[in-house]
Amino acid sequence: MLPFQLQALELPQPLGSADFLEFDQLKAELGQLLFYDPILSGNRNISCGTCHNHALGSGDGLSLGIGEGGQGIGTKRTAGSGDDQIRKRIPRNSPALWNLGSKEISTLFHDGRVSISDVYGNGFNTPAEEWLPQGIDNILAAQAMFPVTSQFEMAGNPKENEVAGATHDRIDAVWPILAKRVRVIPEYGEMFIRTYSDVAQPSDVNITHIVNAIGAFIGLEWQSFDSAFDEYLSGDESALKPTERNGLNLFYGKARCVECHSGKLLTDQKFYAIALPQFGPGRTRRFDPMVRDVGRMAQTDRLEDAYRFRTPALRNVALTGPYGHNGAYSTLEGIVRHHLNPESAFESWEIEQAKLPEVPWLSEVDYVAYQDDRERNRLKSNIDIQSVELTDIEVEELIAFLNSLTGGSSVKGRFGRPERLPSGLEVD
Ligand code: HEC
Ligand code: HEC
């Protein structure tokens, strides 16, 4: 390999601790507990950690997860029974949370519905619009406002609990109820007083204190930049094996992956349609009950954004399958080959390539959108990626490169999963 190839390939600068926002240690310690505490869910039965678990690379190991009302984690998660049985799968894949505390991150969610922006005068463009309170530290904290308001993720069904009832009135009615639940637990109350200078007594705690703690935890916990690729970027050419280096050359060259997976985080944070096969309940909209997911278009209302999803970051990608916004592929080979020829991959895809908890009554809708001819055609006629021809060996090299993006010690996190919670509830 030629030494000047580094420049020629436009490799990113190394990622390092200076690229991250500053997060307060005390807030993060509190955030670790809140992140895993089901107290923030309507029926006290699910936490952020259920779907973003340390044991599962900060995701849930499933294509589409099972939300509030289920039990267990990963492929062992069950879907309840009788009146309490889960009524639909979570419509999108639970993403990994690596490096989201980077200063560069400006957009969250597969469709980018949380972003840094001042349209509403509170620092963020979110589904809560102007109802998002002031005083939110960063985009991770802003994001944490939403899972708790979502019926199928954490809030539960109307009439089951006071949280779910409140989300039906107006989104911001939920937050004071949750803040009160947390602050009346003496151990939490004391921690908030210790952590925040504007909290003199537990009754001063509001939702912004809670989400700022969770944001600090996520931001500090899942920083990862000690992979072989990172060592290579820092100048150690021997860090990558020859196959991995060939894969890197393909990624930044002939295979054109860098056109979208660019920069220090290997994402441009923009939106593209790559025609992943649709399955599951879809992200239906009030006026669009078809079980489909139009992606970015649901946010922008622009037809050209149909089926576009945000380019994912790729560090630790080997740990975070299934892949894509709906987890259509369980393997790296599956998702990589899909990129090379989306249309033919779309045609030959089978649901066995996904990883779904087997639940007969949930499977009923799984295939509806994939089998609908008009929907198939719409999806196939909106593809933003050009086909690339690679040999089988080149595909293997690309996958070897993707494996070299797995971090070393940083993968374990700094705080880990807590052993016990101030609420006394169980840790998933
Ligand atoms: C039922 C499973 C579930 C629970 C519980 C859950 N999440 Fe998620 N999380 C998801 C899914 C699915 C998405 C992607 C949704 C989308 O893009 O539309 C997501 C997205 C995110 C993202 C955005 C990641 C990115 O790269 O854009 C963050 C951050 C996050 N969740 C944090 C949290 C926090 C904090 C909590 C608890 C307050 C939480 N999640 C609870 C499933 C869950
Ligand atoms: C045109 C932009 C674009 C190009 C070029 C591109 N990707 Fe992607 N990639 C995406 C988007 C967008 C997604 C997510 C699609 C979705 O969720 O529907 C994605 C998803 C992925 C994923 C899944 C990651 C995860 O966490 O789910 C991997 C792995 C990946 N790409 C690798 C590659 C490789 C390797 C190449 C080069 C062969 C490549 N990409 C080229 C836009 C692109």
Image (cartoon, helix red, strand yellow):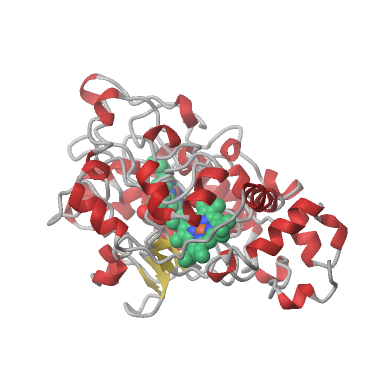
Using the rendered view, name the quadrant where residue 299 is placed: bottom left
x, y percentage for residue 268? Answer: 52, 70
**Up/down of 339 relative to 365, above or below:** below
User: Whole-percent x and y of residue 14?
Assistant: 73, 68
> Residue drawn at (87%, 57%), measured in percent from left and top?
238
- Residue at x 36% of width, y 41% of height: 41
In this rendering, the answer to whether 262 lies above or below 291 is below
Asked if residue 208 can be seen in this view, the reply is no
Viewer-proximal residue among 141 and 178: 141
Question: x and y percent of residue 49 in the render?
Answer: 50, 40
**Left or right: where does residue 274 sit relative to residue 49?**
left
Q: Which residue is found at the position 64% from the left and 49% from the top? A: 399
User: Looking at this view, is 423 or 101 the one in front?
Assistant: 101
Identify the residue shown where x is 35% and y is 64%: 113
* Residue 261: % across, % down: 56, 65
Whether residue 30 is visible: yes
In the displayed image of the protein, which residue is found farthest to the top?
82
Q: Nearer the viewer, residue 93 or 354?
A: 354
Indicate left or right for 218 with 92 as reference: right
**Nearest the camera: 42 or 246?**
246
Quadrant of the drawing holding the N terminus = bottom right
**Relative to 359, 400 lies left or right:** right
